[in-house]
Image (cartoon, rainbow, N blue to C red):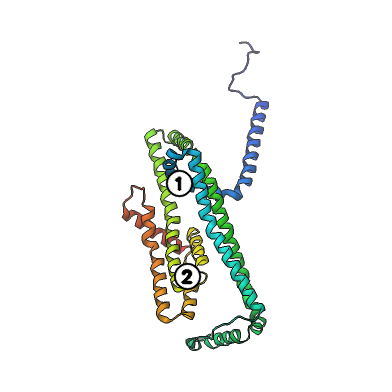
């Protein structure tokens, strides 16, 4: 046998293995660097993908008349306007209210009503609250000097919370703009997902079924979150305006943002109900409380209906899933 015959092609030389290792290492470093860059925008990109899937049927309907780019442009403009409009209204309202408050404080024209009679009979804290309230109503500068340190912490938290809401709203606006661009490539993305799942499952029919089910699930979840948050915030807004709250508009927007963020609305409605009981008649306050309770409980009916749209799943299964999810959330620390 010839000793100088070339070795089998399956044998790799050390230099070839080193080149392959270098290539894999460079690819890993590139993936890591890209992940570090994209990670801060992961939430925005995820919401963009969800919104794109949710808005794709609307895009197909509009594209027959406006074309792909015209439909995407219209969806983007309307979505951004709907997201930015309430925020502009809230910022304007808050700026006006702060200006009026500062002007009133400078001119000593702030009038605080006397404490209600029932407050004095509150166990443990009634007398102290009446003392503080009376001092605020009669001598506001002295009250700020004496108790100002008690409100500095809540005011700082409130500012941080408001800043977080503003950042969340701007992120939602950016997500809507990106989603409007993504819907143009919806057909290509759907075909890519189908081919990928076909390779994984080995069945074209199964891949098509999975793509359809995934899209319907995403739309159902998005409608279940955004739709329920929109309906509940509008219903709460009706109550806020009906009771005559001056900040009804900003409170409605806060309710919408809390609903989208899956934050319990009772964190907002409970202080508002307390304020209404302190400033309005008992009958009006009770009606307002009942309305808020009804709106809060409507989540148990609206969410399964929204989640079930487009899914071939029986309603009892959806209700069982919703109940299990609530129990799981309640069991978390």
Do we see residue 333 in this rendering?
A: no
Number of on-image labels: 2
The part of the image, by quadrant, that contains residue 214 is top left
Q: Nearer the viewer, mark 2 or mark 1?
A: 1
- On screen, 140 above or below 301? below
Mark 2 Cα shell of 10 Å, populated few (<14), some (14-19), many (≥20): some
- On screen, 208 above or below 90? above
Residue assigned mark 1: 55
Q: Are marks 2 and 1 in contact (CB under 8 Å)?
A: no
On the image, the x and y values in percent for residue 221 come to: 43, 52
Left or right placement of residue 23 versus residue 274 in this view: right
Residue depicted at x 50% and y 66%:
249
Residue assigned mark 2: 269
Q: Considering depth in this image, is 283 or 308 the residue closer to the camera?
A: 283
The part of the image, by quadrant, that contains residue 131 is bottom right
What mark, if any, has residue 84 been given in the picture? none
Do we see residue 276 in this rendering?
A: yes
On the image, the x and y values in percent for residue 228 come to: 42, 58
* Quadrant including the N terminus: top right
Q: Considering depth in this image, is 329 or 86 the residue closer to the camera?
A: 86
Residue depicted at x 58% and y 85%:
137
Label 1 element class = helix
The part of the image, by quadrant, that contains residue 323 is bottom left
Q: Residue furthest top?
A: 1
First in sequence: mark 2 or mark 1? 1
On the image, the x and y values in percent for residue 267 come to: 50, 69
């Amino acid at each position: 046998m010839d000793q100088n015959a070339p070795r089998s092609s399956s044998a790799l030389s050390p230099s070839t293995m080193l080149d392959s290792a270098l290539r894999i290492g460079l690819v890993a470093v590139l993936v890591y660097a890209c992940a570090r860059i994209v990670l801060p925008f992961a939430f925005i990109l995820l919401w963009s993908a969800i919104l794109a899937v949710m808005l794709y049927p609307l895009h197909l309907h509009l594209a027959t008349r406006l074309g792909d780019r015209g439909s995407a442009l219209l969806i983007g403009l309307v979505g951004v306007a709907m997201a930015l409009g309430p925020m502009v209204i809230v910022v304007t309202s808050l700026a006006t209210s702060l200006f009026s408050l500062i002007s009133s404080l400078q001119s000593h024209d702030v009038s605080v009503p006397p404490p209600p009679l029932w407050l004095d009979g509150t166990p443990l804290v009634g007398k102290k609250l009446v003392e503080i309230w009376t001092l605020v109503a009669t001598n506001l500068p002295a009250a700020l000097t004496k108790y100002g340190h008690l409100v500095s912490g809540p005011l700082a938290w409130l500012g941080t919370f408001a800043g977080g809401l503003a950042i969340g709203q701007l992120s939602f606006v950016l997500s809507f703009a990106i989603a409007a661009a993504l819907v143009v490539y919806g057909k290509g993305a759907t075909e890519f997902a189908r081919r990928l799942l076909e390779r994984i499952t080995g069945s074209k029919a199964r891949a098509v079924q999975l793509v359809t089910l995934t899209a319907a699930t995403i739309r159902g979840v998005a409608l279940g979150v955004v739709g329920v948050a929109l309906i509940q915030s509008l219903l709460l807004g009706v109550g806020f305006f009906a009771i005559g709250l001056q900040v009804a508009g900003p409170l409605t927007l806060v309710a919408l943002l809390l609903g989208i963020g899956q934050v319990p609305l009772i964190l907002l409605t409970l202080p508002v109900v307390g304020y209404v009981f302190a400033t309005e008649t008992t009958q009006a306050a009770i009606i307002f409380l009942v309305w808020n309770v009804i709106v809060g409980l409507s989540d148990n009916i609206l969410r399964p209906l929204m989640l079930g749209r487009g899914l071939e799943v029986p309603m009892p299964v959806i209700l069982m899933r919703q109940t299990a999810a609530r129990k799981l959330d309640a069991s978390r620390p």
